[in-house]
């Protein structure tokens, strides 16, 4: 039987502390305990955030790939799972740890607060559609909150017309929509808002030409030609000399890995991937 610890998280709201109980399973607490030791060995607290990101991602190398870990609850709530990841949850947890000011057990509340801000629009859990499901929307929100800057255009990106509708046109794939059809209307409004923004991407054929502009720790969103989607994968840029590799939770490898091939060559083997968008810590 799995043990669950309830962490009482205090959040300042207009001078009043709102207390919320966040469940941490024993196994996740153990992962964090090991991570604090790792963070001290890597001297993370004294490194710039962009340098922390690949080091933290490396800590999770070999962790199993698992989709659907955020769909466990009967209602939308902050779910913490540091034992298995999909590409999105790997990135979310890595960033939530990278933006910490200290690396010990006292940092757990801030880690959870970071995770909430990174996963949800305006950092608030207000139902299923407050979660940032589309990666282009996520990058927009991360820039708005000051976590990342979209540097795609300055790295050579061209206009990327986005027309997202995959979730609402495939509502049967999402249990939350089956439970509450009103959520479909809410998601349609979000999809419309995304389509009105101006985005940029770097075509796959041009990645080799601009590789020197990609920096260690950049967040890489892999764009797709799948109808109704903006991206199909996300990961972290790791530099080896002048070449860029992808640190990511891979469904094909079944775990968190560093790509064996440079990013441009890795993407050549996946026809549906059309290019990249880039987020960077400033």
Image (cartoon, rainbow, N blue to C red):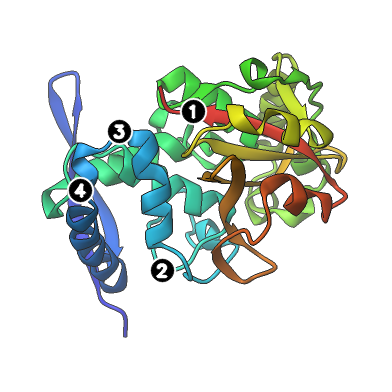
Residue at mark 2? 83
The numbered disc on residue 280 is 1
- The residue depicted at 23 percent of the width and 66 percent of the height is 34
Left or right, 79 with respect to 141, comes to left
Look at the numbered discs 1 and 2 and tell me whether their residues touch, using CB distance below 8 Å.
Answer: no
Residue at mark 4? 43
3D distance between C-alphas at marks 1 and 4? 21 Å
State the SS at label 2: loop
| Figure check: 45 above or below 93 | above
3D distance between C-alphas at marks 4 and 2? 23 Å
User: Which of marks 2 and 3 precedes in the sequence?
Assistant: 3
**Quadrant of the rendered structure where residue 114 is?**
top left
State the SS at label 4: loop
Label 1 neighbourhood size at 10 Å, few (<14), some (14-19), many (20+)? many
3D distance between C-alphas at marks 3 and 2? 26 Å
3D distance between C-alphas at marks 1 and 2? 26 Å
- The residue depicted at 54 percent of the width and 44 percent of the height is 241
Q: In this view of the protein, which residue sits in the foreground, 56 or 65?
A: 56
Residue at mark 3? 48
Counting from the top left corner in percent of width and height, residue 201 is at 73, 26
User: Which of marks 4 and 3 precedes in the sequence?
Assistant: 4
State the SS at label 1: strand
């Amino acid at each position: 039987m799995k043990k669950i610890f309830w962490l009482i998280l205090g959040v300042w709201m207009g001078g009043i502390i709102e207390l919320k109980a966040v469940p941490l399973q024993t196994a996740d607490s153990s992962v964090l305990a090991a991570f604090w030791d790792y963070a001290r060995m890597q001297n993370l607290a004294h490194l710039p955030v962009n340098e922390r990101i690949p080091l933290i991602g490396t800590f999770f190398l070999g962790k199993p790939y698992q989709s659907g870990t955020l769909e466990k609850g009967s209602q939308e709530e902050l779910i913490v799972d540091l034992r298995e990841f999909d590409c999105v949850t790997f990135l979310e947890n890595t960033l939530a740890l990278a933006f910490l000011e200290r690396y010990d057990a006292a940092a757990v509340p801030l880690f959870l607060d970071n995770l909430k801000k990174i996963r949800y629009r305006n950092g608030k859990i207000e139902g299923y559609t407050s979660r940032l499901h589309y990666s282009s929307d996520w990058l927009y929100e991360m820039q708005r909150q000051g976590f990342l800057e979209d540097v795609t255009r300055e790295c050579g990106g061209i206009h990327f017309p986005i027309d997202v509708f995959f979730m609402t046109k495939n509502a049967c794939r999402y249990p939350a929509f089956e439970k509450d059809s009103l959520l479909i209307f809410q998601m349609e409004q979000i999809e419309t808002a995304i389509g009105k923004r101006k985005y940029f991407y770097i075509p796959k054929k041009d990645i080799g030409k601009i590789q020197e502009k990609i920096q260690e720790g950049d967040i890489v969103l892999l764009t797709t030609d799948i109808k109704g989607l903006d991206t199909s994968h996300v990961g972290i840029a790791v530099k080896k000399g002048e070449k860029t590799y992808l640190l990511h939770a891979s469904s094909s490898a079944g775990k968190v890995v560093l790509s064996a091939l440079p990013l441009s060559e890795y993407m050549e083997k996946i026809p549906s991937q059309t290019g990249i968008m880039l987020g960077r810590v400033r």
